[in-house]
Amino acid sequence: MTARQPLIIGVTGGIASGKSTVARAFAQHGIPWVDADDVAREVVAPGEPALAEIRRRYGPRVLLEDGHLDRRALRDIVFADTAERRWLESVTHPRIRQRLGEHLEDFRRRDVPYVLLVSPLLFESGQYELVDRALVIDVPESLQIERTARRDGVDEAQARAIVAAQMPRDERLSRADDVLVNEGDERRLADQVAELDRQYRALGGLPPAR
């Protein structure tokens, strides 16, 4: 008898939409996840080929004293120049996708109801090809900008530039299989996650969690 393969649910949304908060809410239902942002940090760690390519292009100005990538310095460069952002994506996205696939394959061998792939660039990077279903976390753009400025310590103009560099909200929603609205109401978020958990277990042929 063939072992059941757990569904892979892609979780995405614009910056500061609350993707990690949603993942932690699913964890309360026993659901594991892999975070593309964590993997993105892995592939530019000291000793990784991607970091060597970045250093060759930009020099030591994008490195911290300990040899790690200065993510803020690099962000300032790529968000000011679309060509540089595309170059960086060409270096990092294939490596991120490969490593995500390895993590997901490991989860597939475990007895879990389903798995989350949490990624801000699920659609833009082609990572959606790794998932069975896409869940979009949706928030108003004004709230995104406010949260980004507060969280990352940037001014409103830079926060707006970061949001503008991402996929438009309407396009992201048009590609969603499911949508979760996260405007900061913890109870509503928990209720939406509980309902989605029931749906995903049913899709995977499993009974509801007890």
Image: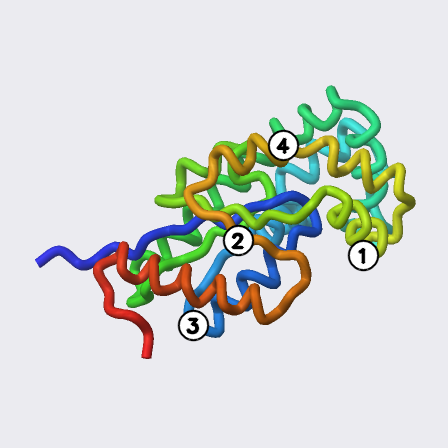
Q: Specify few, some or many for label 3: CA neighbours under 10 Å numbering under 14, 14-19, or 20 or more.
A: some
Q: Which mark is residue 167?
A: 4
Marks 1/3: CA distance? 27 Å
Q: Earlier in the sequence, mark 4 or mark 3?
A: 3
Q: Are marks 1 and 2 in contact (CB under 8 Å)?
A: no
Mark toward the viewer: 1 or 2: 2
Q: Earlier in the sequence, mark 1 or mark 2?
A: 1
**Which residue lies under the disc numbered 3?**
29
Q: Residue 42's x, y, as percent?
A: 61, 51
**Which residue lies under the disc numbered 1?**
151
Q: Are marks 4 and 3 in contact (CB under 8 Å)?
A: no
Q: What's the residue at 78%, 53% (across, down)?
A: 147
Q: Earlier in the sequence, mark 1 or mark 4?
A: 1
Give the structural element (helix, strand or loop) at label 3: loop
Give the structural element (helix, strand or loop) at label 4: loop
Give the structural element (helix, strand or loop) at label 1: helix
Give the structural element (helix, strand or loop) at label 2: strand
The kind of residue tagged 3 is His
Q: Residue 174's x, y, as percent?
A: 50, 33
User: Left or right: 187 with respect to 2?
Assistant: right
The kind of residue tagged 4 is Met
Q: What's the residue at 48%, 74% (across, down)?
A: 28
Marks 1/4: CA distance? 20 Å
**Residue with the most extreme top position:** 83
Marks 1/2: CA distance? 21 Å
Out of 137 and 63, give the one closest to the viewer.
137
